Amino acid sequence: MADGVARWGRRTVLRRAALLGGGAALGVVGTTQTAWIADRRLPLGGGPASATLGSRYQQVGGGVEVVWGVHTGAPLVALTFDDGPQPHWTPMVLDTLAEHRVPATFFLVGERARRHAALVRDRLAGHEVGNHSWAHHDLARMDAHTAYDDLRRSHEAITAATGVAPRLLRPPWGHLGGAVLHAAARLDYRLVLWTLQMVEGEYPHDPAGHARRIVADVRPGTILLGHDVGPERRLVALRGLPDMISGLRARGYTFVTVSDLLRRAAVPGAAR
């Protein structure tokens, strides 16, 4: 038994040594992680990591852009909300934005947009919509065909519910894989992540404190992530939204949609 274990151990060491020898150029010799990666080679085409379909013709456009925010000296901020629409929460956000005349970008879940279309119909003037997947499943675990079918289905539902075809994509949890990039390129989307996220868990029952924290952290060109769906603790951010808006305006900030932020950042002095 001991001799058998020893032979298994020698074979494993030799196998790892051979695998690691091929990784010397990567500067990672001596790590078992490299052996694992070499042993579990990802497919050349297909699967969630691959941004190609292998040797098959690629049904994509010229490429896809990924943005977290923009570099600009102008005091601009883009307010975004994920995961809706949802009864109670989404109307609360829309009411607050209307009262303060603030535009925002809503990354909608297609299944919810179809089910709750009445919540957003005729209420998005001045706002922007983006695609946030069909049912908030992890796109980064899907292959290119599945990710494309998910986003196309959501795209059609959002367009039917709002009357506006989305041109932006934010994948759930910000998870990116090659297949997501491929699907986004096929749909001619811009991929939008975020610069700063609400931190409701740090300010339970303190909407004003949370608002002050966000106001202090915003920088010019920030894309700010909030939610109009979720657990009860997220209401801290929504209840503090008026203070957040007034606090940012007191610092000289102008609210814009994500697409407007991207356009105006490309033109020096356009926000003055």
Image: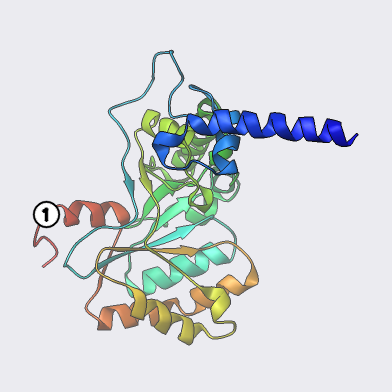
Left or right relative to 256: residue 23: right
The vertical placement of 51 against 154, above or below, is above
The vertical placement of 248 against 71, above or below, is below
Q: Residue furthest front?
A: 3
Please indicate, yes or no, whether residue 48 appears anywhere in the rendered image: no
- Is residue 51 or residue 78 the one in the foreground? 51
Quarter of the picture holding the C terminus: bottom left
- For residue 236, which quarter of the picture? bottom right
- Is residue 90 or residue 267 the one in the foreground? 267
Q: Which residue, given by chain and number where applicable, does mark 1 sit on?
A: 267
- For residue 222, which quarter of the picture? bottom left
- Is residue 25 or residue 74 the one in the foreground? 25
Residue at 45% x, 18% y is 54
Q: Position of residue 73 (x, y in %)?
A: 16, 67
Q: Position of residue 86 (x, y in %)?
A: 58, 58
Residue at 53% x, 43% y is 30
Q: Residue furthest right?
A: 1
- Secondary structure under tag 1 reads loop
Left or right relative to 19: residue 77: left
The vertical placement of 219 against 28, above or below, is below
Please indicate, yes or no, whether residue 154 appears anywhere in the rendered image: yes
Residue at 61% x, 74% y is 233
Residue type highlighted by circle 1: Val
Q: Position of residue 123 (x, y in %)?
A: 42, 57
Q: Residue furthest top?
A: 56
Circle 1: is it few (<14), some (14-19), or many (20+) Cα within 10 Å? few
Quarter of the picture holding the N terminus: top right
